[in-house]
Image: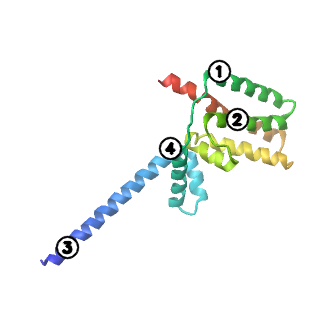
Amino acid sequence: MDTWVWILIGIGAAVVVLAIVWSLVRARRTKQLREGFGPEYDRVAADAPTKREAESELQARRERHEQFDIKDLSPERREEYQARWTEVQASFVDEPDKAIARADSLIQEVMRERGYPVDDFDTRAADLSVDYPDVVENYRAAHGTRIAHERGKSTTEDLRKAIQHYRALFAELVDTGTREEVRS
């Protein structure tokens, strides 16, 4: 065979090998994002025009998150926040609407102290999804109920569910340090 045929075969083989490597890298990235983001991966993928755009969004969240200085709460601050949460829950019986607003504010305060930016809701939810992909949907549901209530479109039962959703996220945000200390 002529030399040019061997060159073409070599180029073809290189292209095939590169395609296989590229495919494996993409599959690995997808697997890591699915495992890391859990149900949040599916939510973002459903909202994005393409899988590539969804994965780029999730990767951008991770990169943004790496810029944060996230820190655990001291045991004293955890206790203070737990006491304040107990007050929020107790106030729900008499003033559910105010309790929901206080719960949302308390979540933001804990986030701020831990080192998360608290600019706007969508950014907060995206930032939380990196560390808490399993409960961020609770946060979205609770926030949605709060907005609906402000517009007069929620029931007391909706507010009760919202306080439960806030509680799930609150527990994760406040108890993180405790779990890490136990693991060490």
Q: Which residue type carries mark 4?
A: Gly
User: Which is more N-terminal, label 2 or label 3?
Assistant: 3
Q: Secondary structure at mark 2?
A: helix
Indicate the secondary structure of the residue bearing disc 1.
helix
Q: Are marks 3 and 2 in contact (CB under 8 Å)?
A: no
| Colour setup of the view | rainbow
Q: Which residue is mark 4?
A: 36
Q: Is residue 65 visible?
A: yes
Task: Judge whether residue 153 can be spotted in this image.
Answer: no
Q: Distance between the Cα atoms at labels 1 and 4?
A: 30 Å
User: What amino acid does circle 2 point to?
Assistant: Glu
**Residue 175 vs residue 66: left or right?**
right
**Label whose residue precedes the other's in the sequence (3 or 4):** 3
Q: Where residue 75 sits: x, y (%)?
A: 61, 21
Residue type at mark 1 is: Glu
**Residue ID at (17%, 77%):** 4
Q: Earlier in the sequence, mark 4 or mark 2?
A: 4
Q: CA distance from mark 3 to mark 4?
A: 43 Å
Q: What secondary structure is marked by label 3? A: helix
Residue 68 horizontal/vertical position (percent): 56, 41
Given residues 123 and 35, the one toward you in this image is: 123
Label 3: which residue?
A: 7
In this picture, residue 59 sits left or right of residue 165: left
| Dot label at residue 109 | 2
Q: Which of the two discs, 3 and 2, sits closer to the camera?
A: 2
Percent coordinates x, y for residue 102 in the rendering? 78, 35
Q: What residue did someone put label 1 on?
A: 76
Q: Disc 3 and disc 1: Cα gap in Å? A: 70 Å
Disc 3 and disc 4 in contact, CB within 8 angstroms: no
